[in-house]
Amino acid sequence: MLGLVRARRPRIQGDREGTRQWFESAETLRQTAASDETYPPFMAACFARVGDFDAALRLLESVDHLGVVNHRFLAEQNRFFAPLRADPRFQALMEKAREKQRAFEVSRTSTSSRTG
């Protein structure tokens, strides 16, 4: 899978339509991105890099339900998402991820206090 991305990488830079066509034509990649928590953020970074913010946000939203979005990395450190940070949709998605993490931490703390 990563080989597909690496093979395409030189052409990804700045080619919004080519990147979208490539992603849509790569059935295995699309299936993996739809069922895996690892690839969507990586692919979203590719789309953000070429300025296709809608596609990037759709991919990030696709992993939100899994509760595995590393919001701190995406919201503060990942340079490819810098152009998205001002987008209210990205901000809302990161806030939702923060809330999920808080809820997880609270449940983990209450579970460990009951078992400890």
Image (spheres, rainbow, N blue to C red):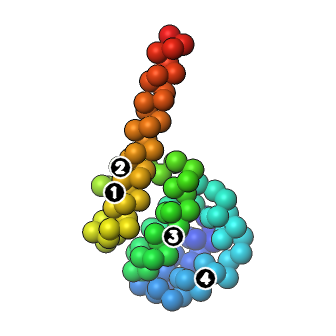
Give the CA distance from mark 4 to mark 2.
29 Å
Which residue bears the numbered disc 3? 58
Tell me the residue at 37%/65% (across/down): 90
Q: Amino acid at mark 2?
A: Arg
Tell me the residue at 41%/59% (across/down): 93
Q: Are marks 2 and 1 in contact (CB under 8 Å)?
A: yes
Q: Amino acid at mark 3?
A: Arg
Q: Which mark is residue 22?
A: 4
The quadrant holding residue 62 is: bottom right
Give the CA distance from mark 4 to mark 3.
16 Å
Give the CA distance from mark 3 to mark 2.
19 Å
The disc, 1 or 3, on the residue closer to the chain's N-terminal end is 3
Which residue bears the numbered disc 2? 72
The disc, 4 or 2, on the residue closer to the chain's N-terminal end is 4
Residue 24: horizontal and vertical position, in percent? Answer: 63, 81
Q: Amino acid at mark 1?
A: Ala
Which residue bears the numbered disc 1? 75
Q: Which numbered disc, 4 or 3, marks the residue closer to the eye? A: 3
Give the CA distance from mark 4 to mark 1.
27 Å
The disc, 3 or 2, on the residue closer to the chain's N-terminal end is 3
Tell me the residue at 51%/89% (across/down): 17
